[in-house]
Image (tube, grey):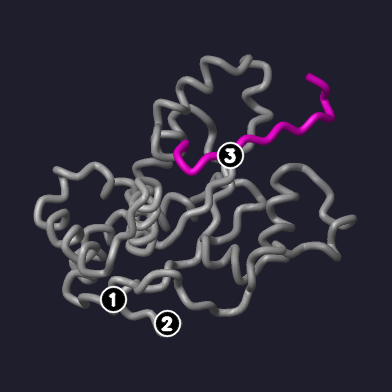
Amino acid sequence: LADSALYLDASTKYLLDTGAASRMKATIPAALHSKLRFIVVLREPVERDRSWQGQKARTAGKVMGDEEYVHSVRVRTQSPWTFPELRHGFYDQLLLGWWQQFPRSQFLVLNYDSLRVNQTDSLSRILSFLDLDPAPMAAEMKMARWNEDPHKAAVTPLSHLDAELCAALAALYAPHVQELYRIVNAPGRHPAQPEFPNFHHPCNDSRR
């Protein structure tokens, strides 16, 4: 591989599979391990669940209505360990699984909402993280399909459907969210890594 070459790969599922980290480490030549960079974008976990459930239904050729989603949350929060997909929002555990294989300093962890509303700063950090000079691209530091302004969600948020269930799901994720803040903001992060901002509270979201 040429020293100046930049190879990119992206998937929404890599983070969920910590086994992928060990397979990657075993497959990629050891001489290249230190050159690897991982960019992780994390969405508030209650919102992520709402979005993911809708996407799962669309992939199956279905439409998940509000009542169906509320029912799914009620069933899953009553017995959370029966439903592995709830752990997709345990970001602290997922990151620690990857950090067992690759150094923490090779990861840039970004907040989904901050990435959307602070595009210029976020893209500058990403380029710096990848050892690329952001200056030549300064005039184009925007994501063409992503508006920075507040926007209406494609689906009704859980907080508007059932406040009690929203609180229950948020409580399930709360300790993992707090641990996420601790480990991402701890010493040893890459210089391009910003202080990870707190997620907005999903059950008290004034943006809607």
- Is there any visible trace of residue 178 in the rendered image? no
At label 3, which amino acid type do we have?
A: Ala
Q: Residue at coordinates 24% horizontally, 42% vertically from top-left?
A: 84
Between 44 and 109, the one nearer to me in the picture: 44
Q: Amino acid at mark 1?
A: Ser
Which comes before the other along the chain, label 3 or label 2?
A: 3
> On residue 10, which mark appears?
3
Residue under pointer 1: 159
Callouts 1 and 3 close, C-beta under 8 Å:
no
* 4 falls in the magenta region: yes
Q: Earlier in the sequence, mark 2 or mark 1?
A: 1
Q: Gap between marks 2 and 1, in whole Å?
A: 10 Å
The quarter of the rendered structure image containing the C terminus is bottom left
Residue at the spot of label 2: 208
* Marks 2 and 1 in Cβ contact (< 8 Å): yes
State the image quarter where residue 17 is shown: top left
Which residue lies most toward the bottom here? 206
Region in magenta: 1-14
Left/right placement of residue 188 relative to residue 44 reads right
Q: Is residue 32 left or right of residue 159?
A: right
Image spot of residue 196 (x, y percent) = 51, 60
Residue 189 rendering spot, x and y as whole percentages: 57, 47
x and y, in percent, of residue 51 in the image? 39, 59
